[in-house]
Structure formats: structure tokens, C-alpha cells
Amino acid sequence: MASHIRDINLWESGELKINWVRAHMPLLGGLEKEFAQTRPFAGLKVALSVHMEAKTAHLCEVLAAGGAEMYATGCNPLSTQDDVAAALVHQGLNVFAIHGATPEEYEEDLRSVLRVGPNLIIDDGGDLVTLMHKEFPELIPGVIGGCEETTTGILRLRAMDRAGSLRFPMMLVNDADSKHLFDNRYGTGQSVWNGINRTTNLIVAGKSVVVAGYGLCGKGVAMRAKGLGAKVIVTEVDPVKAMEAVMDGFQVMRMREAAAIGDLFVTVTGCKDIITTKDFWRMKDGAICCNAGHFDVEVAVAGLKEIAVSHHPARENIEAYTLENGRTIYIIAEGRLVNLAAGDGHPAEIMDMSFAIQALSARYLVEHRDSLTARLNDVPREIDHEIARRKLADWGITIDTLTPEQYTYIYG
């Protein structure tokens, strides 16, 4: 067993966190029992890079129950919970993750889970897959395939696919209906505001909240902001999504105009330079900025540091930057993922669905290893529907089914 963690003695509090989410993740619980019987990953090494917190830990347990030799790391230095990492190591898993790791430490932890020569990769944001192609090409023949969790990671994969550089199959887990329709909208919507509220301890009602990006994640953030009593402004580059925001009852304008109005800004785009130094100059004194996209490039924190005459910690996980005009801008969690760097991430019941798709997609890769090619693969519809049926059953809900005549009428 190998590890790079903060302190193994933290394992007991980490185990409490894992026990809590385990009790609220029935889909993974069911798969854990099935996998323990069928052992679909026996003899295989799995490299995982996902936010190292309790729900991810349970996914690691489920894969390990299926026979996988787990090598796990985080996908964001500030989302790692040291006690959870310690709990997994205490169970006998290989974990390389430390909260607040330097960029160098973070990359070395990624390398640590790749050097072992993984057969399967579970990725969140694309760092593992990118690094495998860049630094460990000699190990690629041993890779059966991988699963990608996020929109940002899929964007990176599509770029690799267009360039013809992707060398093993990847499952687009984020694009599964039972993932993105619920995780991205309801999971992000709730967890972002959990992170903001617990970090700032300020009221949302009556404030002007600017949501940059109106994809499913942005829709969830805007919906919850409205429910908390905020006046919501949306910024977009896609004209269709902008129309959606208008018809959903939100103001839509350019960031240039919104910068002068907003009290609280949330970027949810997956792109860079959404809030720039030009925008900071236009903001009110006391404006608060945070990011709900995967990487810390949406809010130009580096540019803010350059134009600020001073900065200091204003509260735990909030930095205050004072400009020459005397106004102060606050940044939550260094511009990293606010729902994880300043919170516990998505609710357990949401990640139960997302991680169940991860587990079943990983099994699909193993079962179809001889027929899949080095390309992007959608999660099969039967996996999507299996997750939905299991979730409905957990809720005690039954639904209608098509009669043979109805099936013929629709599908011929």
C-alpha cells in the first residue's frame, strides 16, 4: 500500500463522514453488494482523480469491492478532505491527496496514480487522461479505457478527439441523462449556495446575483438564487441560452453592465477570463466573486492581485482585495470550485446517481474491452435507464410501461 496524505491519525472523523454518505447512497450500496459477488474489476488497477471527499471515498469502496486495486487522488487541491483520505488509507487503499497541495504536489500526486500502470481511469476534469497521454505514453497499451465526470473534462476530451490524439476509449459519463440533468442542475444549484452561505454568513435575499453561464449548472445556480430571494442577472455568449434565461424570468446583459450592478458573482462557464480586471474596476465596494466551474481560470484572481493596492484574509476562505479607488472586492476560495473548496460538494443522493453511472460505465468498459475503439463513447441508454429505475424504486415510485401495441405504434 502506498500513500501521500496529511495524517493517518485523522481517519476516524473521515470514517464518520463516509458512514453518513454511505447511508444516503442506496444505488452505490446495491452495486457494492453486486460487485462483491461478481468481482468485475478483479486483477485490474483503477486510477481515480475526483474530489477527495466522502462521496468519492464511497465510490472507491464500491470499485474495490468489485476487485479493483484502487489508486486515488483528488482533482482539486482545495476540495481534498484530509480525514477522508486518511480513512481510505486506513481501509487499505492507495491514496495520494493533501488539502492545500501546491501545484507541484498536486501534479506529483496525479503522477503517483498513473505510474502504477492503471487499466481503468476515472477522471474529473481531464487531468489524469491528459497527463497519461503527455508523460506516460508507454503505459497507454495497458489502459482499457476511462470515464469522465464533468463538462470541462469532456470539452478537453473532444479537443483531443478532434486532434486525433486520444488513444483509448472514454465514456462520457457527464452526458448521461441521469447524470447531467440532475447532478449539474440540482446538485450544483444546491451545493454552490451551500458553499457561499456557510462561507460568507450573509443574506442572499434582496441582493443582485450575477450568474455567468446558463447551461444546466448555471440554470441550477440561478434557480436557487431566485428561491433565496435574489434579483438574478444572467450573462451568456449563446443566444439560445440567453433567450432561455429571459423566458425563465431573469435579466440578461453583458458582464460589462452586470459588473456595476451585482452584489455577488458566480461564474459557471467552463471557460476562462469571464470576470476580468476591467470588470473589477466597475464593481461595487464589497462585491463578492466566486467560481462554480471546474478550473480556477474563470475569475481572473491573478489580475486582481496585480491591480490591488493591498489584500488580506477577510474571513476563513475569503480574501479581500482593495483597489486604488478604495473599493474592496472579495474572492471566495481563491476562485476555485466554491461548492467543494468552500463546502462538501453535491448532496449525497445526487452523487449516488452520478457515481453509480461511473461504476456501471467502468464495468461496461471491461465487459466490452475487445470491441471498443479509441474514441468517445456515450453511456449506453440501458445504463441510464437502469440508474433511473433504481432511483425511482428507492423513492417507492412505479411508472407505466408501453404495451406491445404502443411500442409498435411509436417505434414501428
Image (spheres, rainbow, N blue to C red):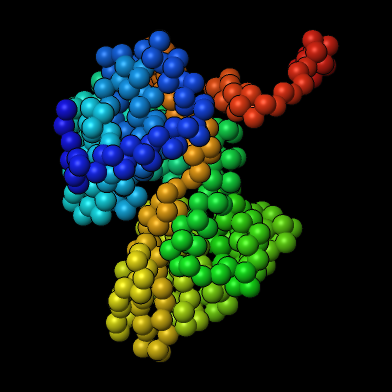
Q: Quadrant of the C terminus?
A: top right
Q: Position of residue 325 (x, y in %)?
A: 40, 89
Q: Quadrant of the N terminus?
A: top left
Residue 207 lies left or right of residue 323; in this view the side is right
* Residue 108 sits above or below residue 78 on the image: above
* Residue 224 sits above or below residue 181 on the image: below
Q: Residue at x 49, y 21 (%)?
A: 30
Q: Residue at x 60, y 73 (%)?
A: 207
Q: In the depicted view, which residue is nearer to us: 364 or 399?
A: 399
Q: Position of residue 36 (x, y in %)?
A: 38, 14
- Splitting the image into 4 quarters, where does residue 116 fall? top left
Q: In the depicted view, which residue is nearer to us: 40 or 125?
A: 40
- Splitting the image into 4 quarters, where does residue 319 fall? bottom left
Say if residue 242 shows up in the picture: no
Residue 42 lies left or right of residue 112; in this view the side is right
Q: Position of residue 51 (x, y in %)?
A: 36, 43
Residue 110 lies left or right of residue 221; in this view the side is left
Q: Residue at x 57, y 56 (%)?
A: 221
Q: Position of residue 172 (x, y in %)?
A: 47, 32
* Residue 404 sits above or below residue 120 on the image: above
Q: Residue at x 19, y 46 (%)?
A: 6
Say if residue 289 shows up in the picture: yes
Residue 83 lies left or right of residue 175; in this view the side is left
Q: How many marks?
A: 0
